[in-house]
Amino acid sequence: MKKIILFAVTAVVFLSCSNNNNTDVQSAQPGEMAPPLIGYTVVNTYPHDTGFYTEGLEFHEGHLFESSGAGSPEEDGAKPYPSAFGIEDLKSGKVDRKVTLDNSVYFGEGITIMNGKIYQLTWQSHKGYVYDAKTYKKIHEFTYPGEGWALTHDSTRLIMSDGSSN
């Protein structure tokens, strides 16, 4: 069942990224430039740990970091997904967990790594965490309004999405 769901999700993602000109895509208004189409090339594929519910991915110093949100797989008897983050082994797809949150309280969301620190959001708990990027020890907690979804940075500032257009 997991393979069917993974195949369906992958197919939807690839079909939505196609370069065909659908009629439901709005054209630029007179005097406006249409955004350029950006193509893509798949250069490799990697296995994935299906025990993780991916919420964030970031490459840092040659490693792929992945964060996961809590939840329960639909299949009976499957282990719940952890609210955690760690480094993914690209050969096996398994994640070496570095930090795990309490699933009964937190749903882990996006992560980003900046200036020697890892920043992690939670979904509806209004709480974020800062960890040392070498030791993974928590060094700070912070709060924010709204829901935490995605997190990135521009080398000087954190940039957070709350799932809206903001």
Image (tube, helix red, strand yellow):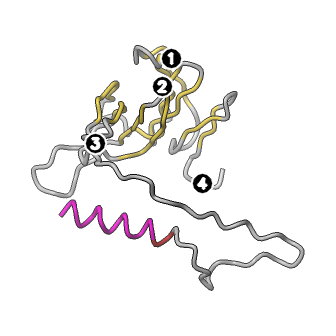
Q: Which mark is residue 140?
A: 1
The amino acid type found where label 1 is placed reads His
* Alpha-carbon span between mark 1 and mark 2: 6 Å
Identify the residue position indicated by label 4 in the image: 164
Is residue 133 within the magenta segment? no
Q: Earlier in the sequence, mark 2 or mark 4?
A: 2
Q: Nearer the viewer, mark 1 or mark 3?
A: 3
Q: Which residue is mark 2?
A: 129
Residue with the mark numbered 3: 93
What amino acid is found at the position of numbered circle 3 in the picture?
A: Gly
Q: Quadrant of residue 84?
A: top left
Residue at disc 2, secondary structure: strand
Secondary structure of the residue carrying tag 3 is loop
Q: Are marks 1 and 2 in contact (CB under 8 Å)?
A: yes
What residue do we see at 89% from left, 74% from top?
Answer: 31
How many C-alpha atoms fall within 10 Å of the one at disc 1: few (<14), some, or many (≥20)? few
Q: CA distance from mark 2 to mark 3?
A: 25 Å
